[in-house]
Amino acid sequence: MHNPPHPGLTIRDDILPELNLSVGAAAECLGLHRTTFSRIINGRSSITPDFAIRLSQWLDIDAEQWLRLQLQFDLWNARKTCKVKIRRLKVNKSLT
């Protein structure tokens, strides 16, 4: 996948407007402090397993789906920024 969006942006740009909810109201529904929720929906904090469960209960969207979206975002960014070159391990065929 090329340049996947941070999953928090989906919440901010698609879900909150559809539900006609403010950041503060949504944070309260999810049992989060407004600034914590704001950091997630603005792409500055990751969707954690705990938050994914909260979203799952709130929106009836699998927690695993939220975590997959976060993983795709994190892997894409890691591949883009990782500059370390690792030599491939040569395995002796008799050991396998």
Image (tube, rainbow, N blue to C red):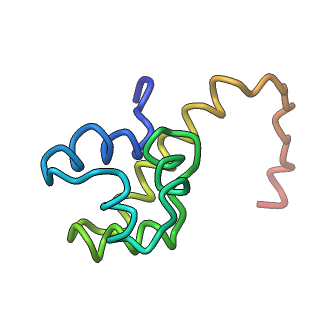
Q: Please, is residue 53 above or below residue 72 in the view?
A: below
Q: Please, is residue 78 above or below residue 63 in the view?
A: above
Where is residue 73 drawn, in percent x and y?
50, 39
Quarter of the image where one finds residue 48: bottom right
Which residue is painted at 41% across and 46% down in the image?
8
Where is residue 52 drawn, in percent x and y?
42, 66
Left or right of residue 63, residue 76 in this image: right
Which residue is painted at 34% across and 67% down in the image?
55
Which residue is painted at 58% across and 41% down in the image?
44
Q: Please, is residue 8 above or below residue 95 in the view?
A: above
Closest to the observer, 6 or 79: 6
Where is residue 96 drawn, in percent x and y?
76, 60
Where is residue 22 drawn, in percent x and y?
28, 51
Q: How many marks?
A: 0
Closest to the observer, 30 or 48: 30
Left or right of residue 39, residue 59 in this image: left
Which residue is painted at 51% across and 69% down in the image?
49
Closest to the observer, 47 or 79: 47
The quarter of the image holding the N terminus is top left
